[in-house]
Amino acid sequence: MSQPHPAAVKLAAGPLTLVLAPTCGGGIAEFSCNGAHILRPATEEAWAAGSPRSMGSFAMVPFSGRVADARFPWDGGDVALVPNFPPERHAIHGDGWQQAWSVVTATTSVAQLAFDHVGATPGWPWSYRCEQTFTLDPDCLTMTIAIENRGDTPMPVGFGFHPYFLRTPNVRLRAAVPEVWVWDTAKRPAAKIATPKAWALDPERPVAGLALDHCFAGWDGSAEIIWPEHRLAVTIEAGQKLRHLIVFTPETDVFCVEPATHAPDALNIEPETLPLLAPGKSISGGCRLRVRRT
């Protein structure tokens, strides 16, 4: 980002810099250590397009991943969502990532963004408020999501974080992931199996050569990413509610390591794993990106 964008919210602590993009899905436009980018930096074109998928990270609320065919059974009927990732027929990542967020508060090291969804049909039928809090310390970024049910009936709820880490030739990844969901041809979860050796991420291994677009279950909440070229490492420390890890390693300049509360399409395949949030009640959870020099 050559010039600060008018909508940007900038935080700094020690060697770390965080730039938030409230108008682009409440996402992160920059997260860097002494100028070395950890997440993909937003370009001026990304800001102009308002594209959350061109940012460094965004929140997934009130669900993570795909909902097959943009519908799920509920209370004796079906909830019809809006397919929001053409040409796919599914709904993906909820509402917040494609909306503008408001700035509730911002200091030099703490910022809070908010998004209010008014229930509508077709679409997510419950009203809710989501707040993201970003706290920057000299050695870590803490991200917290809080969701309040502002509707009149209980609603299922889930969330997650979708960071795009910069991919270098020698970057490595470690995570203990004992189980994995495999997909059908329509990108719907078909079965949960023990993680095959070819997909195992413990001990650490190079991202190069991995061909993953999978959700792992039974994750212990810790993952490490190491950039030998920059003598830099990040440890992901996820809270107790985030025990699924989506890993996506496309042949591009980024890869994704996404802590989430549930498996994709959980609203259809295992709805009992999503908390049921009563009217007026809130749920929260978060993760840290702890940065160290190697």
Image: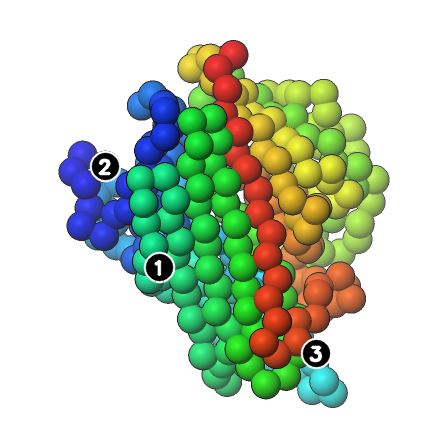
Question: Image check: 145 left or right of 19?
Answer: right
Callout 2: few (<14), some (14-19), or many (20+) C-alpha neighbours within 10 Å? some
Q: Mark 2 highlights which residue?
A: 1
Asked whether the beta carbons under mark 1 and mark 3 sit within 8 Å of each other, the answer is no
Q: Mark 3 highlights which residue?
A: 73
Q: Is residue 214 something one can see in this rendering?
A: no
Front label number (1 vs 3): 1
Q: Secondary structure at mark 2?
A: loop
Q: Position of residue 161 (x, y in %)?
A: 53, 48
Disc 1 marks a residue whose amino acid type is Val
Asked whether the beta carbons under mark 3 and mark 2 sit within 8 Å of each other, the answer is no
What is the distance, in whole Å, between disc 1 and disc 3 at their CAs? 35 Å
Name above or below for residue 28 compared with residue 263: above
Looking at marks 3 and 2 on the same chain, the residue that comes earlier in the sequence is marked by 2
Residue drawn at the location 55% of the way across and 69% of the way down: 148
Callout 1: few (<14), some (14-19), or many (20+) C-alpha neighbours within 10 Å? few
Q: Mark 1 highlights which residue?
A: 104
Who is closer to the viewer here, 30 or 153? 153
Q: Position of residue 132 (x, y in %)?
A: 46, 54
Q: Position of residue 191 (x, y in %)?
A: 79, 53
